[in-house]
Image (cartoon, rainbow, N blue to C red):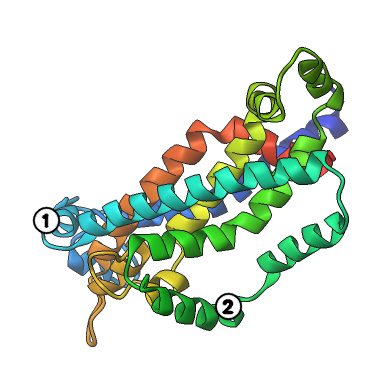
Amino acid sequence: MNERTRAGVIFTYVCAALVVAVCLFPFLWMALSSIKVLRELYTIPPVWIPTVPTLENYRTVLFDSNIPRYFLNSVIISVGSTTLALSIAIFAAYGFARFRFRGKAYYQSFILIGQLLPTAAIIVPLFVTLRYLGLVNTYLGLILVYMIITLPLSVWMLTSYFRAIPVELEEAAIIDGSSRLGVLFRVTLPLSIPGIIAVLVYSFITTWNEFIFALTFATDSSVKTLPIGLAEFTTEFDTDWGAVMAASMIMTIPIAVLFLSMQRLFIGGMTAGATKG
């Protein structure tokens, strides 16, 4: 390795380290702040390492607030909407990828346009619709709303992935006597696991972190989600930043575990969906 190559490698590692440090700093600061006492949170200059680490903030969040209930609500709503969106996206994407019908290109464009609509343009019609159906402040109402906002991109991603699978494999299964549904579940879906994981992670993270729709459609504590629950630690005159940081850690851990456990499949599915088809 000559000096120029060695310098290039060192520069690459330094840049990568800087990017990692910038990305991880907010999470590290959140973790450290969650175990600080109140006076250390307001100290200037800031105290980087807590002198007397405490779990009092976590005790407050877990036993003196509604965060456990909001956590359960977020799990129910996120899992429900992700499952529903993924189920519909699989059939819709397979239809777009394998069948020819009049207006297919226009339908695909309309689906993508649905993803591009700003929140302000759809929040009022959605609220009116949910109120008419009696679904405001219900699990089902939020699940349907989250399905609507994640379904367009899910269909688009899976369509690209299904198109990358050779049609000959499906034709061979049909010749052997398999039905179209049999082909989908026995041939196409097993080969599409990375793409399905990518859609699953995208949908779950989107719904888990969503704030505006939850703030509008879930005003009752029985259906509030974690992002809304964080605001309850802020009063007119003060904010309990220690509790906010502890609750944020509790909210972040499931997403971090989900992404780290499926990182390889998620990246593979995103890459395949973007470059194939």
Q: Position of residue 173 (x, y in %)?
A: 76, 17
User: Which secondary structure lies at badge 2?
Assistant: helix
> At 30% across and 75% down in the image, what residue appears?
219
The outermost residue toward the bottom is 236
Residue 29 x %, y %: 39, 56
**Amino acid type at mark 1:** Phe
Using the image as rendered, state which of residue 260 and residue 223 is in the foreground: 223
- Circle 1 packing at 10 Å, graded few (<14), some (14-19), many (20+), is few
Q: Residue 85 at x, y = what percent? A: 55, 50
Q: Is residue 185 rendered to the left or right of residue 124? A: right
Q: Which is closer to the viewer, label 2 or label 1?
A: 2
Q: Which residue is mark 2?
A: 122
Q: Quadrant of the N terminus?
A: top right
Does residue 96 appear anywhere in the picture?
A: yes
In terms of image quadrants, where is residue 273?
top right
Q: Locate the C terminus and report the quarter of the image it occupies.
A: top right
Left of 80 or right of it: where is 88?
Answer: right
